[in-house]
Image (spheres, grey):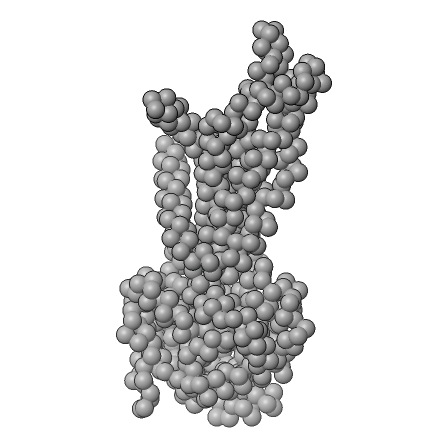
């Protein structure tokens, strides 16, 4: 608790009640945050405009507008199931929008040719939420996969770079190199996934909950790694996380996803001071508020005791 | 009811279309065959050589059953000496390739679909794409190729074991010397039967490989979907193997044989 307060002065995440919902009719609650121009001296790398996506009848993304700048660390917060993973899958062109667009460096991902996508993805590293390691390959083969399959590097160079990448995520290379993912712990798999994402020294890294399931020391290590990559190599990072400390530690800007829109986008200070009830609830972890409202006021099945 | 039939036809047409495009892309990926060496070797390991024992058992038993059945008929007409040719022809043209296909689709095809299905569900395939690794080149092409190498070998083995089974039974049951049986069968090897059987087994390999990879990569809905992909692979493969067998027989009889006769 102390550390939380220390890393995040200026916000009162643990005090103060969630703002009265009456002041916030649904329209205002769900309204998207207006698009702000990039900070001076920053270049826009990704432009997301009016992005919508539905799976069947369920409208998951309902109009995302955001600019992500080159070299910034952009953190996405949001309740479970709010569509964070769905959003970043659009950024890696694994999903195509129902409407709207994602434009990266002038390239509209939905209209790009397969060759253009290959080139685009070569600049990108992705840490999947479930690590997504290939189960039939060893750790060495998994982490080295982009080097052997895409860059076609010789085996000894691959091995050296794999060992280095594993060291960066605090994994004992000599113990695990020849193991299959199935015999690693969840936290180890996650870190092997991170090692795979950084091994090609990508200029854009997407992290989908990189620190979930890791011990506090490793969490800090991974956060520091993210910072280092940004500061030393100018990597653009987009980080989905449920870890508020991490968010406030690494973020240049934070965005909050709620009901398919970014209801707030801004730097740490702006987010910390933002009175939006959804944001307050996310930051305090309170069980009363708009995030749980739908659930509490949902119709009880007939005959159920009230 | 009618709507359902229509929907199922559409669904199958969609699968067929998808398979054809997948096969096309796999053929294109053959350009990178050198880079896929380790994958191909890995797949060869799983591509049916583990099924040799079962296949031998089934082929041998079929040969024995056929020898008893056909032999007792032939004996009535006093043409038992032709038994070897009949069993040989049946095995080389039909039984060998079909049994090899059935065993391979049930064991290898199903497990390929399950493996690729699990990979799809676990986002491993997405991860490959994000790393700019083409799943068709990395996953599909080596699998189809491995089957194309293993199937003719398995077929040849089935032919041989089937014949052997037949020969042994003929000797035990009818007292015909092994040599007579084998000499009668040998007449075939300069004929088309053996090679047409091998050609069929190549086609079957392509069918099984393409269907199982397509079903695996199209898997949705978690573990349940993996189960469904596996079942669909077995059913679709059997249907298309038999269908293509029929078509190839037709072509062989109506087109190729007359052509050969002319020359
Ligand atoms: N391929 C899909 N088909 C159907 N529905 C999907 C699909 N992918 C995601 N969804 C739905 O979209 C919603 C958002 O999913 P998503 O994975 O983006 O959430 P998330 O914000 O990443 O949640 P978490 O924090 O739990 O990871 C979920 O309700 C999910 O059921
Ligand atoms: Mg997610």
Q: Is residue B21 left or right of residue B109?
A: left
Question: What residue sits 49% from the left and 89% below the top?
Answer: A11
Give the percent coordinates (x, y) of residue A271: 43, 85
> In front here: B100 or B19?
B100
Q: Quadrant of the N terminus of chain B?
A: top left
Q: Work out whether residue B126 or residue B241 is closer to the camera in this orientation and state it.
A: B241
Answer yes or no: is residue A144 visible.
yes
User: Which residue is found at the position 46% from the left and 58% from the top?
Assistant: B34
Q: Nearer the viewer, residue A94 or A118?
A: A118
**A214, above or below A2, in the image:** above
Residue located 55% across and 52% down the image: B43
Which residue appears at 29% of the width and 69% of the height?
A108
* Residue A179 location, quadrant: bottom right
Q: Give the total of numbered labels.
A: 0
Identify the image quadrant of the C terminus of chain B: top left
Q: Is residue B125 left or right of residue B100?
A: left
User: Is residue A295 left or right of A105 when viewed as pictured?
Assistant: right
Q: Is residue B151 left or right of residue A38?
A: right
- Residue B244, quarter of the rendered image: top left
Q: Is residue B241 above or below residue B121?
A: above
Q: Residue furthest top?
A: B77
Residue B209 point in image, percent of width and height = 48, 45
Q: Position of residue A210 (x, y in %)?
A: 53, 75
């Amino acid at each position: 608790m102390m550390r939380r307060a220390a890393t995040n002065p200026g916000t009162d995440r643990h005090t103060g009640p969630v703002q009265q919902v009456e002041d916030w009719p649904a329209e205002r609650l769900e309204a998207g945050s207006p698009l702000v121009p990039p900070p001076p001296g920053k270049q826009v790398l990704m432009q997301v405009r009016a992005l919508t996506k539905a799976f069947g009848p369920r409208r998951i993304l309902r109009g995302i507008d955001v600019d992500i700048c080159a070299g910034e660390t952009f953190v996405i917060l949001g309740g479970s199931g709010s569509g964070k993973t769905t959003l970043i899958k659009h950024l890696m062109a694994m999903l195509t929008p129902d409407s709207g667009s994602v434009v990266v460096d002038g390239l509209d991902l939905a209209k790009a040719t397969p060759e253009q996508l290959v080139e685009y993805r070569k600049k990108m590293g992705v840490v999947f939420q479930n690590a997504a390691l290939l189960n039939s390959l060893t750790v060495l083969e998994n982490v080295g996969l982009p080097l052997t399959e895409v860059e076609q590097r010789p085996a000894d160079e691959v091995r050296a770079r794999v060992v280095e990448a594993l060291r960066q995520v605090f994994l004992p290379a000599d113990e695990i190199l020849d193991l299959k993912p199935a015999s690693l712990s969840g936290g180890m798999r996650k870190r092997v996934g991170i090692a795979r994402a950084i091994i090609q020294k990508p200029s854009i890294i997407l992290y989908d909950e990189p620190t979930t399931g890791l011990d506090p020391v490793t969490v800090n290590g991974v956060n520091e790694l993210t910072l280092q990559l940004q500061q030393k190599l100018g990597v653009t990072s987009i980080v989905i996380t449920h870890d508020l400390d991490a968010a406030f530690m690494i973020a240049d800007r934070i965005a909050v996803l709620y009901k398919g829109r970014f209801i707030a986008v801004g730097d740490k200070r702006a987010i910390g001071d933002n009175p939006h009830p959804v944001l307050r609830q996310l930051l305090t972890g309170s069980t009363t508020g708009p995030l749980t409202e739908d659930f509490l006021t949902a119709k009880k099945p007939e005959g159920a005791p009230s | 009811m009618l709507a359902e039939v229509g929907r199922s036809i559409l669904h199958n047409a969609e699968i067929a279309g998808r398979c054809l495009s997948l096969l096309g892309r796999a053929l294109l990926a053959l350009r990178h065959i050198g880079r896929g060496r380790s994958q191909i070797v890995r797949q060869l390991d799983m591509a049916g050589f583990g099924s040799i024992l079962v296949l031998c058992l089934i082929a041998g038993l079929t040969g024995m059953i056929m020898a008893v059945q056909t032999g007792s008929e032939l004996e009535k007409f006093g043409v038992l000496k032709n038994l070897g040719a009949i069993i040989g022809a049946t095995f080389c043209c039909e039984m060998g390739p079909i049994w090899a296909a059935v065993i391979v689709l049930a064991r290898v095809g199903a497990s390929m679909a399950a493996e690729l299905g699990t990979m799809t569900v676990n986002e491993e395939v997405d991860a490959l794409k994000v790393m700019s690794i083409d799943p068709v080149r990395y996953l599909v092409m080596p699998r189809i190729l491995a089957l194309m190498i293993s199937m003719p070998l398995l077929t040849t083995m089935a032919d041989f074991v089937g014949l052997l089974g037949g020969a042994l039974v003929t000797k035990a049951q009818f007292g015909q010397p092994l040599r007579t049986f084998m000499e009668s069968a040998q007449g075939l090897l300069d004929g088309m039967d053996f090679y047409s059987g091998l050609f069929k087994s190549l086609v079957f390999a392509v069918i099984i490989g393409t269907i199982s990879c397509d079903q695996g990569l199209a898997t949705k809905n978690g573990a349940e979907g993996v189960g469904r992909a596996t079942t669909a692979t077995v059913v679709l493969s059997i249907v298309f193997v038999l269908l293509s067998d029929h078509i190839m027989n037709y072509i062989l009889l109506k087109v190729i044989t007359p052509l050969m006769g002319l020359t």
